[in-house]
Image: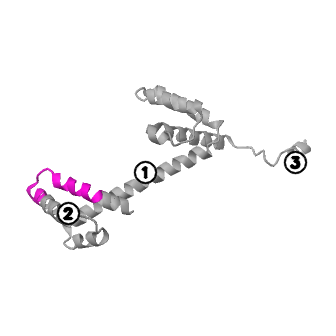
Amino acid sequence: MTEFLHGDWDEDEVLKSKTQVKREMDALQQLGEELVALPPASRAKVPLDEELRDALLLADKLAKKREALRRHIQFIGRLMRSRDIEPIEQALALIRNTNQAATRKFHLVEQWRDRLLTEKDAVTAFVAEYPEVDVQQLRQLIRQAQKEQQKQQPPKAYRELFQLLRPFVTEAE
């Protein structure tokens, strides 16, 4: 019995507690949920085998059947247990970073638009940073957007100003 306790264990073979096993299964299920939530274009960037890809396609079809989708996501989690998930996690991390960068750029465009509408010297600062902008069109849209805000009209020029700023700000980042 003492041999069993001291000498027969492999160094690689580590016993996991029931809680640890459950945490790992939950993490794989969360990963499966994240894959199901991805749009098809993003999902195509993730390295998946055929069985997992088919399971994700079926999950798309089950989207309106709540309980069936829940059970199917559990099935996807079970499928993931027998796979090397590191490449999948890396691809998802890359997709997350891309989405975060796009959100950051979007917020930067919004900040510039709001600054241009409220600060007098913002036009000069914007033109200094993005000299290729059409200054006349920029000033015109700013005036129109300010008038719309004062008269509480629909924000047509406000949106047009955003559309004018977006290519300059997003390409510069």
Q: Secondary structure at mark 1?
A: helix
Q: What residue did someone put label 2 on? A: 138
Amino acid at pointer 2:
Leu
Q: Secondary structure at mark 3?
A: helix
Where residue 19 sits: x, y (%)? 64, 42
Q: Which residue lies most toward the left here?
A: 151
Q: Secondary structure at mark 2?
A: helix
Question: What is the quadrant of the C terminus in the image?
Answer: bottom left
Amino acid at pointer 1:
Asn
Answer with mark 1 or mark 3, whichever residue precedes in sequence: 3
Q: Is residue 114 above or below residue 40?
A: below
Question: What is the quadrant of the N terminus in the image?
Answer: top right
Q: What residue did someone put label 3 on? A: 6
Circle 3 packing at 10 Å, graded few (<14), some (14-19), many (20+), is few
Find residue 99 and name its label.
1
Circle 2 packing at 10 Å, graded few (<14), some (14-19), many (20+), is some
Nearer to us in this view, 140 or 87: 140
Circle 1 packing at 10 Å, graded few (<14), some (14-19), many (20+), is few
Answer with mark 3 or mark 2, whichever residue precedes in sequence: 3
Q: Which residues are magenta?
A: 147-166
Mark 3 touches mark 2? (CB < 8 Å): no
Q: Residue at x 22, y 64 (%)?
A: 134
- The quarter holding residue 171 reads bottom left
- The answer for how far apart the CA atoms under marks 1 and 3 are is 51 Å
Mark 1 touches mark 3? (CB < 8 Å): no
Q: Is residue 38 visible?
A: no
Answer with mark 1 or mark 2, whichever residue precedes in sequence: 1
